[in-house]
C-alpha cells in the first residue's frame, strides 16, 4: 500500500466516479483502476460498488475512507513541517553568548536577519520574555524554538 493508492481511493470516493477522479488526479483511468484493484487484492475486500448514481464505497470502503483521509492529511502535514524546517522558516535556534551580550546584541542581530522578517515580532517578544530566564538558568546560553 502506498500514498498514491490512498489518494486515488479518496478521490474516487469524493468524486463518485473513476473517470472524474482520474481527471482531478491527472492520472489515466486504467492506472487508477489497476491501483484500486491492487488495493482490493491486498485487503481482500471489495471497496466500491458500481450503481446508477456512480461509484459508491462499500461498508469496507466507508471505514477505510476515514482512515485513509486521516493518514494522507498526517503525511501532508509532516511533509510541510519538514519543508518548513528545511527552508529555515521553522526549527530550533540555539544562541550562546555572555549575559551582557544577549541584552545588547541579540535584538540587533535578529532585526537584521531577513529570515526572521515574518516572525520578528513574535521572536522579539519571546526573546524579551526568555532573556530573563536565560540569564537566570543558563548563565548566558540562550535556546529558543522559533
Image (spheres, rainbow, N blue to C red):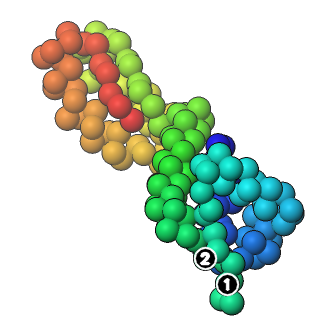
User: Who is closer to the viewer here, 100 or 64?
Assistant: 64
Residues at marks 2 and 1 touching, judged by CB atoms closer than 8 Å: yes
User: Who is closer to the viewer here, 95 or 45?
Assistant: 45
**On screen, 47 above or below 125?**
below
User: Who is closer to the viewer here, 48 or 115?
Assistant: 48
Q: Quadrant of residue 47?
A: bottom right
Residue position marked by numbered label 1 in the rendering: 51
Q: Position of residue 35 (x, y in %)?
A: 75, 54
Q: Secondary structure at mark 1?
A: strand
Earlier in the chain: of badge 2 and badge 1, it is 1
Is residue 26 visible in this depiction of the protein?
A: no
Q: Name the residue rendered at 35%, 31% in the picture.
A: 145
Q: Position of residue 113 (x, y in %)?
A: 51, 34
Q: Name the residue rendered at 61%, 76% in the picture.
A: 56
**Quadrant location of the N terminus in the rendered image:** top right
Q: Quadrant of residue 114?
A: top right
Residue position marked by numbered label 2 in the rendering: 56
Amino acid at each position: 500500500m502506498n500514498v498514491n493508492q490512498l489518494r486515488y481511493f479518496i478521490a474516487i470516493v469524493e468524486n463518485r466516479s473513476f473517470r472524474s477522479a482520474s481527471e482531478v488526479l491527472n492520472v489515466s483511468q486504467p492506472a487508477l483502476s489497476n491501483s484500486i484493484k491492487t488495493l482490493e487484492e491486498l485487503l481482500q475486500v471489495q471497496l466500491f460498488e458500481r450503481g446508477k448514481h456512480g461509484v459508491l464505497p462499500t461498508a469496507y470502503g466507508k471505514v477505510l475512507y476515514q482512515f485513509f483521509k486521516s493518514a494522507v492529511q498526517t503525511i501532508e502535514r509532516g511533509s510541510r513541517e519538514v519543508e518548513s524546517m528545511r527552508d529555515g522558516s521553522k526549527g530550533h535556534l540555539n544562541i550562546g553568548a555572555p549575559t551582557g551580550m544577549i541584552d545588547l546584541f541579540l535584538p540587533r542581530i535578529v532585526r537584521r536577519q531577513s529570515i526572521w522578517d515574518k516572525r520578528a515580532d513574535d521572536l522579539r517578544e519571546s526573546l524579551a520574555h526568555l532573556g530573563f530566564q536565560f540569564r537566570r538558568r543558563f548563565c548566558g546560553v540562550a535556546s529558543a524554538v522559533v
